[in-house]
């Protein structure tokens, strides 16, 4: 059975890359909702509807498990989808927030005991406007870690520059956002790249942040978390390492823009 990987556009390819390295014998179906990207400036109700449609499309491709490789969809839509729509007996959807929260707090997601002293002090979150507005990340951190403060910054224009393949400009945009955050918190203990597009300009973030700030990047964390999940839920495993690429946009144009993520144009098909 293939595992679905969903993003608003091309950012999820950074997650897919880590997943295929960690699980080379697993089949995957990637779906980029390029016709509707970016999600980050959309109202929550639209993100909810688009995410549900994308996940349903991947269920129709026989995916029993879908990874929401999009922080915006994970922060805004996942909880409601799990409560109101998904039947966990047949399908599961996992977001990209949980492994980051578990990593930072060193606590399992299912641990609902009161917040403890985890050693976490101040965290910088770089994300889309919708992810920041959802408040999901600071809420989940504070639920587990006492005394943590989160400074969130909506990185306007960054996804657009990356989707356009202009990494020089994207690096400049990232440096500008880091400077704005450091004006508020000069030396955060940890910084989270809370958007799956941002690993493409990770070097720009790293260079602009103080050396003592630990940079948390999602792809490796998500891959380790999925490998662990599949160990506990082997029914979602399957295949021989085949990867399909679907898009709601124009497959040729999307494939050629994806080159900046993958080094080659993936063979996108119409979703
Ligand atoms: N890559 C997505 C994320 O992780 C969304 C970017 C967008 O569509 O605005 O937030």
Image (cartoon, grey):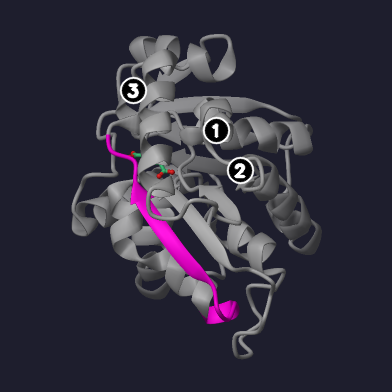
**Depicted 150 relative to depicted 268: above or below:** below
Quarter of the picture containing the N terminus is top right
Q: Left or right? Give the position of 1 relative to 193.
A: right
Name the residue that disc number 2 marks: 217
Image coordinates for residue 248, horizontal then vertical, percent = 32, 29
Report the disc number at residue 228.
none
Alpha carbon separation for disc pair 3 and 2: 19 Å
Q: Is residue 134 visible in the rendered structure shown here?
A: yes
From mark 2 to mark 1, how far is it between C-alphas? 7 Å
Quadrant holding the C terminus: top left
Q: Which residues are magenta?
A: 143-156
Of marks 3 and 2, which one's residue comes earlier in the chain?
3
Q: Kindly identify the residue that appears in the image at 50 percent across and 14 percent down.
A: 260
The residue at which mark 1 appears reads as: 199
Give the side of residue 43 with respect to residue 183, left or right: left
Asked if residue 149 lies in the magenta stretch, the reply is yes
Q: Quadrant of residue 231?
A: bottom right
Label 2–label 1 contact, CB within 8 A: yes
Residue 6 image position (x, y, % from top left): 46, 41
- Residue 176 placement: quadrant: top left
- Identify the residue under disc 3: 161
> Which element carries disc 1, helix, strand or loop?
helix
Q: CA distance from mark 1 to mark 3?
A: 13 Å
Q: Residues within 10 Å of mark 3 (few under 14, many from 20)?
A: some
Report the residue at 28% width, 38% height from top: 156
Q: What is the secondary structure assignment of the residue under circle 3? A: helix
Q: How many marks?
A: 3
Q: How many other residues sit within 10 Å of disc 2, few (<14), some (14-19) or many (≥20)?
A: some
Q: Tell me which numbered mark, 2 or 1, is placed earlier along the sequence.
A: 1
Q: Secondary structure at mark 2?
A: loop
């Amino acid at each position: 059975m293939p595992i679905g990987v969903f993003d608003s556009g091309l950012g999820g390819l950074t997650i897919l890359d880590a997943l295929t390295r960690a699980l080379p014998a697993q089949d995957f179906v990637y779906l980029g909702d390029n016709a509707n990207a970016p999600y980050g400036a959309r109202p929550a109700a639209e993100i909810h509807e688009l995410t549900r449609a994308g996940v349903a499309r991947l269920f129709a491709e026989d995916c029993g498990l879908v990874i929401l490789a999009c922080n915006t969809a994970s922060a805004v839509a996942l909880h409601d989808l799990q409560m109101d729509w998904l039947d966990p007996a047949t399908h599961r959807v996992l977001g990209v927030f949980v492994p980051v929260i578990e990593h930072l707090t060193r606590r399992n997601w299912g641990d609902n005991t009161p917040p403890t002293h985890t050693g976490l002090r101040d965290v910088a979150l770089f994300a889309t406007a919708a992810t920041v507005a959802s408040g999901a990340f600071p809420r989940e951190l504070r639920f587990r870690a006492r005394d943590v403060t989160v400074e969130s910054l909506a990185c306007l224009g960054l996804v657009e520059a990356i989707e356009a393949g202009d990494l020089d400009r994207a690096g400049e945009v990232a440096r500008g956002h880091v400077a704005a955050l450091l004006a508020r918190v000069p030396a955060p203990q940890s910084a989270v790249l809370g958007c799956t597009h941002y690993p493409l300009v990770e070097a720009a973030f790293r260079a602009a942040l103080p050396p003592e700030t630990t940079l948390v990047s999602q792809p490796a964390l998500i891959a380790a978390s999925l490998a662990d999940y599949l160990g506990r839920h082997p029914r979602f495993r399957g295949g021989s390492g085949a990867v399909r690429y679907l898009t709601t946009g124009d497959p040729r144009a999307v494939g050629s823009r994806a080159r900046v993520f993958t080094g080659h144009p993936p063979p996108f098909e119409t979703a």
